[in-house]
Amino acid sequence: MRLPVIFIFITVVLDSMGIGIIMPVMPDLIQEVGNVDLSQAAIWGGTLTVVYAINQFLFSPTVGGLSDAYGRRPVLLIALLVMSLDYLVMAFAQSLWLLFVGRFIGGITAATHSTAGAYMADISTNEDKAKNFGLLGAAFGVGFILGPMLGGLLAEYGSRAPFYAAAALAFINMLFGYFVLPESLKPDKRRTFDWRRANPFGAFKQMKKLPGLMPMLLAFLLLSIAFFVYPSIWAFFGRAQFNWDARMVGMSLAAYGLGIVIVQGALIRPILARFGEKVTALFGMCMHLLTFLAYPFMTETWHVFAFMPISVFSAVAVPALQGLMSNSVSENAQGELQGAMSSLTALATIISPFVMTQVFSYFTNSSAPVYLPSAPFLLSALSVIVAFILFSRWKPQN
């Protein structure tokens, strides 16, 4: 199964690169096609990001449900083909409405993360699921590093270049998968596609029927909201707290992403083998909490990098949680579960940027009762505490 796993890894990398690779050129492209100034371009950029995230939220269970009914292979390959064509549409776009359409479709194709997770669940034993979900987390970290880096380098060749590159990568990966990816879901394990379950609300209603799963899903959502404080306010926090420039912001994010790759790609396996999934998840949450509470006391750049070897171990929490949830559902509902989790991740990408930027703005305003750029991290700490309480009360069902 070596080549299929490589394909799944690359697919998740491309999913996580989807926003980052085009982020450096979006202001220029929006100004170019919309004939608007930078301020208006920022509003359009926010709108396009929200559309992308909302569609991920709405369609992740649909894509996951389709994979439960028709198999993982056709869903993944078709989604990658559409993703490639979508990037080409955006590369040739000459109007804002076409960019809007591109991001609308892109949010749907990015929902393949749920099918990739279901494929990994199919080929894993119960004991290996958390480890293999850690590999998917490492893939996310790789995309988190490579996306903005590649987008920034390609921007030198024009505002359209990153889109051509993203289209080519998606198409090449689709061809790779066509030749190496066998179907992982046997025909006797499939279930009939049902629109009532193939949406986030129907999927959550179905998950509610499974004992003990909803508290874990809620803990997963709270952890995701807490984690997305990084892309939401890190650049602003770095400037306000340490007077960082764009280069230092990029270096710190790349270092953090590299740490996540190492932890989820290699170190999570011995940790799970030694402590098990529940203890590992609780340990990861504790590392999250310790990190978020430490930021208000960091006054020098070296403090951030010195603490990073501790903070990156928070990355073990979500894969362990995913492994426990995956073992709680049947084989023909793995896509549905992964779709529900992908929807929650997308929901977190909608909630967290809005809330965290508002909190940052309030506590860095001249009229704030106290100047506290790290306030969003304290809110994230509160979110982790609630997740910890919810999850610590969970007991395996007999």
Image (cartoon, rainbow, N blue to C red):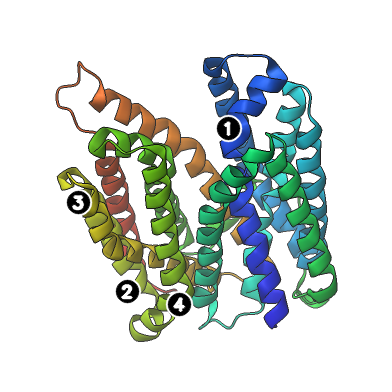
| Residue at the disc numbered 2 | 279
Asked if residue 337 lies left or right of residue 161, the reply is left
Asked whether disc 2 touches disc 3, contact meaning CB atoms under 8 Å apart, the reply is no
User: How far apart in space, not on screen, are marks 2 and 3 (Cα)?
Assistant: 22 Å
195 lies above or below 179? above
Dot 1 or dot 2: first in sequence order is 1
Total labels: the figure holds 4
- Crowd around label 3: few <14 · some 14–19 · many ≥20 (10 Å): some
Disc 2 residue type?
A: Val
- Quadrant where the N terminus sits is bottom right
Q: Is residue 222 visible?
A: yes
- Crowd around label 4: few <14 · some 14–19 · many ≥20 (10 Å): some
The residue drawn where x is 69% and y is 35% is 158
In percent of width and height, residue 70 lies at 82, 63
The residue drawn where x is 41% and y is 43% is 247
| Residue at the disc numbered 1 | 50
Nearest to the observer: residue 81 or residue 276: 81
In percent of width and height, residue 238 lies at 31, 39
The residue drawn where x is 72% and y is 75% is 4
Disc 3 residue type?
A: Ala
| Residue at the disc numbered 3 | 294
Query: On residue 236, which mark appears?
Result: none
| Residue at the disc numbered 4 | 266
User: How far apart in space, not on screen, are marks 3 and 1 (Cα)?
Assistant: 30 Å
**Quick one: SS at disc 1?**
helix
